[in-house]
Amino acid sequence: MCGIIGYTGREQVLPVLLDGLTTLEYRGYDSAGVAVVGAEGGQLRLVKRAGKLANLRDALDGRTLAGTVGLGHTRWATHGAPSDANSHPHTDESGDLAVIHNGIFENFGELKAELVASGHTFASDTDTEVVAHLIGALREAGDGDLVTAVRAALQRVEGAFALAVVDRRNPTTIVASRREAPLVLGHRDDASLLASDVAGLIAHTRDITALLDDQVAILTPGAIELLDLDGRPAEGHRYTVDWDIAAAAKQGYPHFMLKEIHEQPQAVADTLLGRVDVDGRIVVDELRGGRSVEDELRSVDKVYVVACGTSYHAGMVAKYAIEHWAGIPVEVEIASEFRYRDPILTPHTLVVAISQSGETADTIAAAVHARNQQAKVVAISNVVGSSLARAADAVLYTRAGPEIAVASTKAFTTQIVALDVLALYLAQLRGALFPDECRDHLARRAALPALIAQVLESEPAIAELARTVSAARYMMFFGRHVGLPIAMEGALKLKEISYVHAEGFAAGEMKHGPIALIDEGGPVVALVTRGHVRGKVVSNIQQVKGRGAVVLAIATEGDTEIKEHADHVVYVPEVHELLYPVLTVVPLQLLGYHIAVQLGRDVDQPRNLAKTVTVE
Ligand code: F6R
């Protein structure tokens, strides 16, 4: 949940840390801090402040903190309220080493009690400071070697974490480790870097190593050595990223969210690229892995889709596609629920775990839980080499590029598209689709980027609409069939960035309770595109209109009749019924965005949230 950056090399480190933190601030923005090891005399200097990165910049007040080795941290608080004292980095008792960390050390209370009993005093309420003291104490008690002390400390801590340590006594070195929390290393000839995700590194290098659980990395300028916790040489997962530096910048848009909404045509096109061969067959090379994988997928008799938040809504859409095209029963479940029950899993169960970041703790745990029970796990992730990707049997990547805004947009549409390809692929494997049909289906999908671009043209009208409804206390969204997950996603977008209470409902459920919430002028968004449930949704619109609601309908172009029922209409082009979600979500993303802007909210960094939830 926090952003971590580290650099050891020849450049002055402070600008590198501040730029890295700017890129990573979306991961947490309760407080920020840096630690720099000075070249001369090996001093260790820390500056940290509660609040956003701007507060840290103010606190630095133009100081350069000369030095070429350092760590930076932007925090989403777990232990200890956001305050200057609780901000990272934290030092040990001697003040010689500094630690930054993402995650939770679950047994920190017990460790703290031991340290207090042996005379340690603490300046913060954090678990991080306890581990800094533990490393320092183990170093004093041992042979004085930092790496040995870090390894020994990690054998005592419990929980999921990524941490990095700098040390006045080892002025060119950073020591880092992780357990079930993300940490990537960047290689350069003259420097070595680390960050909690690749977005923090791409300005410096594309040559990346994903550190694996319980490995310790020793970074010096131009060299990175990996060990396991027993001190034996280890190997991480090394790969090259193809993300563009520009992709992690706003490029003239006022917010990342708006930029990412507008990137959807390209992101969807990239995700669909190369999915059909010359014979018209659907290609999912990632799932091929030899005949046995194909045979296993052919014999799947049950699919579970597990995910959180927006990715869960993409999973709900996938249920319709997989059941329709492949004829396999699907259950969709929130990962934090799935992981704590006893689902009936067999070697013929396919678990599809969806996560943009690939680092969401609950989704990873659900995937591991499923694999432990012999189910086959396919991950859908946007981040190459992510923890989820590595925990799964196979991974199908969305190609959305870095998603920086906390509110997920392009990741969602690319997830739907990737899951739709997976549904068609399963259908093809099971003989439910002939090559000609596959070719037709993929041709229809190839039109989606241009159709999304067409929907984006409604932005001025949606911005105007946002002005008229931005004073509302609440907003309701409803739909049926594939309109339901989009109603839920539209409500999530609105509530998370505008703080307006919003809920998405199955339209047919309205009269079983939620309709009581409607009062005169209350805004309701209805997903009422063409398809077998359109007429039913129109009836539901009439029911809420009769109770005073103001209705915004998302309907299919050419449906002029809907204007008789709704107060406002936004049209999307006609597509196959199962493909509407890719289009209908776009006006709802824009509506949420423009309402939040109207209300003066911090769109890219909404309160209390962080982009990636790496803790439970
Ligand atoms: C909402 C949002 C979150 C994420 C959720 C899962 O806009 O972004 O609900 O969808 O935290 O994140 P991933 O997909 O990274 O597992």
Image (cartoon, grey):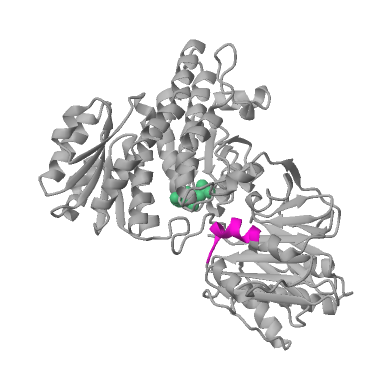
Main secondary structure along the magenta-highlighted residues: helix
**Magenta region:** 19-29
Q: Is residue 344 left or right of residue 161?
A: left
Compared to residue 457, the image places residue 259 above or below, namely below
Give how far across and how far down residue 196 sits, in percent: 65, 56
Within the image, what quadrant is residue 450 found in? top left
Q: Which residue reaches farthest left?
A: 546
Residue 453 visible in image: yes
Give how far across and how far down residue 50 sits, in percent: 55, 74
Q: Is residue 215 left or right of residue 295?
A: right
Q: Which residue reaches farthest right?
A: 143
Residue drawn 48% across the image and 32% down it: 417
Using the image as rendered, state which of residue 54 and residue 207 is in the foreground: 54
Residue 78 visible in image: no
Give how far across and how far down residue 426 sits, in percent: 52, 24
Give how far across and how far down residue 246 sits, in percent: 60, 44
Using the image as rendered, state which of residue 479 and residue 408 is in the foreground: 408
Within the image, what quadrant is residue 297 found in? top right
Compared to residue 49, the image places residue 18 above or below, namely above
Whether residue 366 appears in magenta in the rendering, the answer is: no
Whether residue 20 appears in magenta in the rendering, the answer is: yes
Residue drawn 53% across the image and 38% down it: 351
